[in-house]
Amino acid sequence: MTALAVTGCSRCGSALEVGDLRCPICGLAVGAPREQGVLPAVREQAKVVRCDTCGASLEYSAEVKAPRCAFCASVMHVETTADPLEQAEVFLPFTLEPVAARQALSGFLARKSFFRPSDLAESAALESLRPMWWPAWGFSAGARVSWAADSDAGSGRSQWAPHAGTQDMTFQDILVSASRGLTEEECEKLAGAYQLASAEAAQRGPEDAQVERFDVTRSGARRQILEAVETEAREQVERTCIPGRRHRNVHVAVVLSSLETKRYALPAYVLAYRYRGKAYRVVVHGQDAGVVLGEAPVSVAKVLLVVGAVLLVVGLLALLFLK
C-alpha cells in the first residue's frame, strides 16, 4: 500500500504521510486528520502470525498449519491486529533460484577456518530453506550539513590547521531495516547488494515465499534515518569537502530539508542446517549468491588445543623468567 502524502506541514511545508504524528523535518505535532480537511484513514483488521521468540510477524496464510518461524524455527501464533498501513509498496524480485541458495550454503560450509570442525561440510544436513521478503524503509533526503575538521592544508609550521564549512547534500535510496526476524548487522550487509532499480509492485519469487510485515513505523525509523544520513554526510565530507591529504577530528551536524520514503520488500533465503544435533541459521541474499551470512559451529577440541598451547608458552616463559 502506497504511503501517500496527505498534506503539508503547516510550519515548514514538508510532505506528511499517513500515520505521521510529527513533521519528519521540523518536528511540529500533526493535528487530527479532520482538522486538516482529510478524512481519517480506515484501519482494517488483519491477521498475522507472530513468533513467540524473536517477535517477527509474517502475513497470515490459512494454508500454513502449525506454523514455525522462518527466522528462528520457534512456534508462531495467529493474532488479529489493526492494520497500521505499513505494507510494502514495491518488491524486489528474487533473481537467485533455490538451488543456487543451496549451493551458496554448501560453499559457506566448505569455507576453511581453523576453529571450524573439519567434517562440517560432510556432516551438516540442510533442515529447511525458506524464501522471505524482509521489510525496509528506503529514503531519499536533502540536508544542510555543517562540518568542522583539522587537516594538513594551510598548517604552516604546525602539523594541523582547523577548517569548517557548510554544504547542501542529497542522499538517495538509503535503506533502514524494519525487520525483527533479521539482526541489524545482517540487514546492513544484505542491503548493500540489492538492485533497487529492479523494484516492482508485484511479488515475483518462489511460490512459497513469505512476506515479513513492517514492525517499525516511519516515525519509529526516524532515529535510524538520521544516523544513516549523518554517516553518509560524514563520508561525503571526508571525500569531497576537507582540503589537504590528511585530516582528523571530523564533526558533522545535519539538518534535514526534505525527506521522502518508500516501503521495500527485499528478497533473501533463510536456511537452517543441523550439525551434531544443533541447528544453525544462514541467510543467503535473494539476488547475489556471494552474500552469505550465518552461524557455524566451533570445534571444542581445536579451542582446547589453542588454549593448551598458550598456557604451555606462558608456563615456559614464566620458568625462563624465574631462572
Image (cartoon, grey):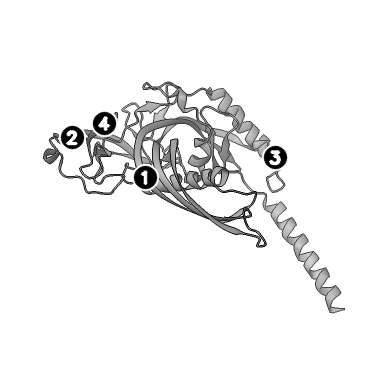
Q: Give yes or no for contact between labels 4 and 1 (Cβ–Cβ under 8 Å).
A: no
Indicate the quadrant containing the C terminus: top left, top right, bottom left or bottom right: bottom right
Choose top left, top right, bottom left or bottom right for residue 3: top left
Residue for badge 1: 256
Q: Is residue 210 visible?
A: yes
Q: Which tag, 4 or 1, sits closer to the chain's start?
A: 4
Q: Which tag, 2 or 4, sits closer to the chain's start?
A: 4
| Secondary structure state at the residue bearing disc 2 | loop
| Secondary structure state at the residue bearing disc 1 | strand
Foreground tag (1 vs 3): 1
Give the Cα separation between the discs numbered 3 and 2.
Answer: 57 Å
Residue for badge 3: 119
Give the Cα separation between the discs numbered 1 and 3.
Answer: 53 Å
Foreground tag (2 vs 1): 1
> In the rendered structure, which amino acid carries the disc numbered 3?
Asp
Residue for badge 4: 4
| Secondary structure state at the residue bearing disc 3 | loop
Residue for badge 2: 41
Choose top left, top right, bottom left or bottom right for residue 12: top left
Foreground tag (3 vs 2): 2
> In the rendered structure, which amino acid carries the disc numbered 2?
Ala
